[in-house]
Image (cartoon, helix red, strand yellow):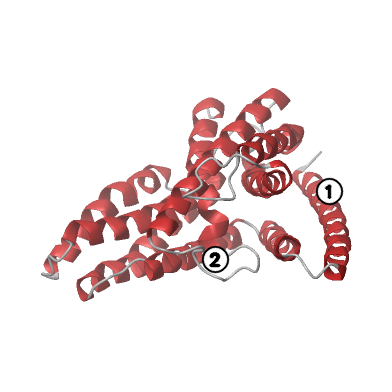
Amino acid sequence: MNVQEKFRWLMGGIAALLVVASLIGWMLGRRAARRGGSATIDNLNARIRAWWVMVAVIAACFLLGRTATIVLFAVASVFALREFITLTPTRRGDHLPLVVCFYLLLPAQYWLIADDWYNLFAVFLPVYGFLLLPVLTALAGDTEQFLERVTKVQWGMMVTVYCISYAPALLLLRVPGFREQNLLLMIYLLLVVQLSDVLQYVFGKLFGRRRIAPNVSPSKTVAGFVGGGACATAIGAALWWITPFSPWQAGAMSAVIVLAGFLGGLALSAVKRGLGAKDWGSMIEGHGGMLDRLDSVSFAAPVFFHLTRYFFEP
């Protein structure tokens, strides 16, 4: 089966799943309306509608090709970084570092992917960007809460730009016999991450009693993590045919993606709570902001990239 056939089968399956989910959501919504409404059902339906849009965007990127995909993630990083900085108090002395982040470091990071320059891509932000930002802040002469301010900007850059850029960076991999299908590998990562988030939410609502970190993320429960994570791992294993992995390898990779994504969501939820916010933004109906949708990806993408590169590149 060639890459186009795999993509058609995959999108057909996702569309069928979303149709079923939409019908279930519609029926639950009607039942809830007769009982006075339900915030949980409304949120679920909003998430399903947002999923339709996200799947359409992913499909469009696949059809438009490599460049469109890189541009999409660059734009997503812009919105995610903006949300992070918006919730993070800044001072006049931070303006130049932020301008450099948005207009130099971010586009340069994605240009390195487009240019297929992995050796510099891997170290550009964590070395050169990391060192540059405190220097620019120091040159502004504002030492008030200097370390705290620099750390926030560095954290924002690393999470919303560097880590998220590892998703389109999967296009750089040279897995034997799979080079022309790397877009499918990226879609695989996104599907497992997002399905894990959705299924953990559903299992948590249905069966969740014991919360994992109630002060950080009240919606994350043991039942949600175990049940939703197990289902997402099984689905990832079943999707081995769009990857260079065998079924058991796909299952192991999916388990790693699920765990890394869960930890990413937990860590960034702690950041939000520390800043006194429930969501990073309100850009995506039912999901919050861009970073609310990509928090799991920001942790899962680098781990998945390096495991694939280590074990499957010659």
Measured as percent of width and height from the top left, residue 267 is found at: 44, 47
Asked whether residue 35 is in view, the answer is yes
> How far across and how far down the image is residue 186, in percent?
62, 46
| Residue at the extreme front | 35
**Residue 252 in the image: above or below residue 185:** above
Q: Are marks 2 and 1 in contact (CB under 8 Å)?
A: no
**Residue located beneath label 1 in the image:** 13
Q: Which mark is residue 190?
A: none
Q: Secondary structure at mark 1?
A: helix
Where is residue 110 shown, x and y percent of the image?
Answer: 45, 57
**Residue hosting label 2:** 289
Q: Residue at image x 52%, y 44%? A: 301
Q: Is residue 21 left or right of residue 136?
A: right
Please give the name of the residue rendered at 14% of the width and 66% of the height, measured from the top-left corner.
144
Relative vertical location of residue 273 with respect to residue 127 in this rendering, above or below:
below
Residue 160 in the image, given as x and y percentages of width and height: 44, 57
From the image, state whether disc 2 or disc 1 is nearer to you.
Answer: 2
Element class at badge 2: loop
**Relative depth, front residue between 214 and 203:** 214
Classify residue 100 as left or right of residue 203.
left
Label 2 CA crowd tier, 10 Å (few <14, some 14–19, many 20+): some
